[in-house]
């Protein structure tokens, strides 16, 4: 039986950097990622730079395999000593949210913390992105994939599709369907 502690967690941190301090911030963020990667349970991190020069918000998305691993990192001295320096480079204190599952796909830039949309809406928009992604993979590589054993073929297809969904498709789908996913919220999406 799986408990919530066994689930991978995604942490989304928003940081608005003081103008002129971007290079220092990015160097410290890279060091923070390097240190986090040495901790058990670390699954990866991505830094999203500001959408425009007028918006100093960086978003850092990182993942750990469970709550215990995440807590060990967040309570570590390695993190604390860098965090103090990073906070000194910010216009306002960091904003942080922890999510699990596909909720991380449904985040609007500049809108943290995020209250996820209803599950049926997330499922529908995910399917609308997933169907063409899978179809495209089979259209482009179907002939090559036929020669690969089933388990390896499934591994390859799901890895490619998850990458496409996480980094290319879902950010656009979330923006395009924001009127339905997040009714009544400010549409000024950065």
Image: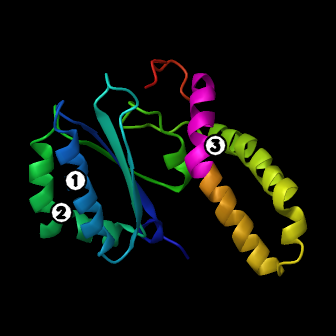
Q: Please state if 164 lies on the left or on the right of 7 as rendered.
A: right
Which residue bears the numbered disc 2? 79
Above or below for 28 versus 176: below
Closer mark to the observer between disc 1 and disc 3: 1
| Whole-number angstrom distance, CA of label 2 to CA of label 1 | 14 Å
Dominant SS in magenta: helix
Quarter placement of the N terminus: bottom right
Which residue bears the numbered disc 3? 169
Which residue bears the numbered disc 1? 27
For the point 43% across and 26% down, the residue is: 190
**Circle 1 SS class:** helix
Q: Is residue 179 magenta?
A: yes
User: x, y percentage for residue 119?
Assistant: 61, 43
For the point 47% across and 21% down, the residue is: 185
Question: 108 or 37, which lies in front?
Answer: 37
Magenta residues? 165-180
Structural crowding at the residue carrying mark 2, measured as other residues with C-alpha within 10 Å and reported as few (<14), some (14–19) or many (≥20)? some
For the point 42% across and 60% down, the residue is: 9
The tag earlier along the polypeptide, 2 or 3, is 2
User: x, y percentage for residue 150?
Assistant: 82, 78
Q: Please state if 3 lies on the left or on the right of 88 as rendered.
A: right
**Circle 3 SS class:** helix
User: x, y percentage for residue 32?
Assistant: 24, 60
**Dot label at residue 58:** none
The tag earlier along the polypeptide, 1 or 3, is 1
Closer mark to the observer between disc 2 and disc 1: 1
Q: Is residue 177 visible?
A: no
For the point 41% across and 69% down, the residue is: 5
């Amino acid at each position: 039986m799986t408990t919530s502690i066994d689930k991978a967690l995604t942490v989304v941190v928003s940081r608005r950097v003081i103008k002129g301090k971007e290079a220092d911030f990015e160097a410290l963020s890279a060091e923070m990622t390097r240190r986090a990667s040495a901790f058990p349970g670390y699954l990866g991190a991505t830094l999203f730079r500001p959408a425009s020069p007028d918006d100093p918000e960086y978003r850092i998305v990182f993942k750990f395999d469970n709550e215990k691993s995440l807590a060990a990192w967040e309570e570590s001295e390695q993190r604390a000593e860098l965090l103090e320096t990073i906070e000194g480079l910010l216009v306002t204190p960091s904003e942080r949210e922890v999510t699990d599952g596909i909720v991380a796909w449904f985040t609007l830039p500049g809108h943290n913390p995020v209250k996820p949309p209803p599950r049926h809406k997330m499922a529908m928009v995910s399917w609308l992105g997933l169907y063409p992604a899978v179809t495209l993979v089979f259209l482009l590589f179907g002939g090559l994939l036929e020669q690969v054993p089933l388990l390896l073929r499934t591994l390859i297809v799901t890895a490619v599709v998850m990458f496409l969904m996480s980094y290319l498709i879902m950010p656009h789908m979330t923006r395009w369907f924001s009127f339905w996913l997040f009714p009544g919220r400010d549409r000024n999406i950065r």
